[in-house]
Amino acid sequence: MATRVRRLARAAAIFGAIGGVVCLLSMTSAVAGAFGAVTAGSLSEMSMAGMPTTPHSTPGILVGLVRWGPEMLGASVGLIVLALGLRHQILMLPALLIGAVVYWAMYGQSRVTVMIVLTLAGFGGWAYLFYNSRMGSARNHGRPNR
């Protein structure tokens, strides 16, 4: 595999993994924040009627991550599929199927436990594919399996 292609595959894998982890962390922190707000609101006996409010009083970065999460995760899945496809074209379909499961786990259903378990299982599946793609190249003395 040429050095440029190897570097491109490595960069795509790194950015894809970072994007996926950021999506997972933003979704879990948004859920934790929602639970915290409900708990604080139910425990508080104060009325918020007289308090001044601003239209943009929520934390900006978390709101942005949650709002753009589906697009970020789609891009991350695409980068990981590209990274694995550059190593071995046959791995593109399993990587895409794992990406579909991860996307569904985060945005297609509403149970937090299912989201976390399936997303971590998907990350593990991608790691397994990367490990096996590297081992296959090492067994063939650097020649790609195609």
Image (cartoon, rainbow, N blue to C red):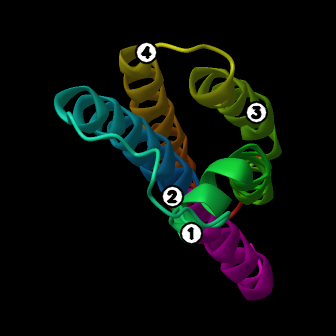
Q: Residues within 10 Å of mark 4 (few under 14, many from 20)?
A: few
How far apart marks 3 and 2 lie (CA) works out to 19 Å
Which residue, given by chain and number where applicable, does mark 3 sit on? 96
Mark 2 is on which residue type?
A: Val
Q: Give the alpha-carbon distance from disc 3 to disc 4, as whole Å.
A: 19 Å
Q: On residue 22, which mark appears? A: 2
Determine which quarter of the picture holds residue 10: bottom right
Foreground of the two, 144 or 131: 131
Check residue 61 in the rendering and tell me which mark sits there, or answer none: 1
Q: Earlier in the sequence, mark 4 or mark 1?
A: 1
Contact between marks 2 and 1 (CB within 8 A): the answer is no
Tag 4: amino acid: Val
In the rendered view, tell whether residue 39 sits above or below residue 50.
above
In percent of width and height, residue 16 lies at 64, 60
Q: Which mark is residue 115?
A: none
User: Label 3's element?
Assistant: helix
Q: Residue at x 57, y 49 (%)?
A: 133
| Camera-side mark, 3 or 1 | 1
Q: In the figure, is residue 141 to the left or right of 67? A: left
Which circle's residue, 3 or 1, is located before the other in the chain?
Answer: 1
